[in-house]
Image (cartoon, helix red, strand yellow):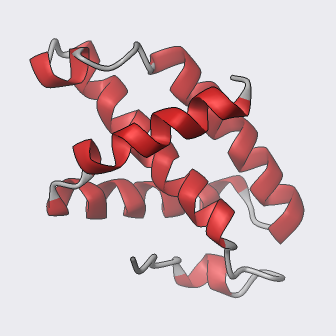
Amino acid sequence: MVFHVPAAAQSGPGAALSLEQRTALRCSAAFAIIAGAQATGDEKALGYPPLAERGQEFFVRFSAGLMDSKGLTRDAVAAMLRAEAQKMSAAGEVHQVMPSCLLLLEGSGV
């Protein structure tokens, strides 16, 4: 699994993400994709628990922690999320990662 970090984020202090941070970024992107699909009534997406609120809260907490630990800006984190969501959508991977992401969501306390 390769994660591409925007050049702006790479230049920040300690910009390399840990496995835990990469996983949370990937799951945040998956939650956003599924929440969007749920909002449009997508049948497959509706098979997951509602993610608009919990998925967004997961991302907010993850983003705040990432900004604090890596010295990244909100814009840099948002760009990383967009890039990950685009990559996952293009590869058709979102449904493959959802089972493990839902476990991560449950374990997060969100």
Q: Residue at x 23, y 55 (%)?
A: 93
Q: Quadrant of the N terminus?
A: bottom left
Q: What residue appears at the point 47 percent right and 41 percent down from the top-left corner?
A: 101
Q: Position of residue 96 (x, y in %)?
A: 26, 49
Above or below, comparing residue 94 to residue 9 in the picture: above
Q: In the image shown, does 52 or 12 lie closer to the viewer?
A: 52
Q: Quadrant of residue 59?
A: top right
Q: Is residue 6 left or right of residue 74?
A: left
In the displayed orientation, state which residue is furthest to the right.
68
Does residue 40 appear left or right of residue 103 in this picture? Answer: left
- Nearest the viewer among 2 and 56 is 2
Q: Residue furthest left?
A: 43
Res. 78 in view: no
Q: Nearer the viewer, residue 110 or 77?
A: 110
- Where 44 sits versus 75, above or below? above
In the rendered image, which quarter contains the C terminus?
top right
Number of numbered labels in the structure image: 0
The x and y percentages for residue 31 are 42, 35
- Kindly tell me whether residue 12 is visible in this rendering: yes
The picture quadrant where one finds residue 11 is: bottom right
Residue 4, given in percent of the width and then of the height, sits at 45, 79
- Vertical order, 99 against 55 (above or below): below
Residue that appears at 27% across and 47% down: 94
Q: Is residue 46 above or below residue 93?
A: above
Please state if 41 lies on the left or on the right of 98 as rendered: left
List x then y, in percent, for residue 83. 39, 63
Left or right position of 31 against 73: left
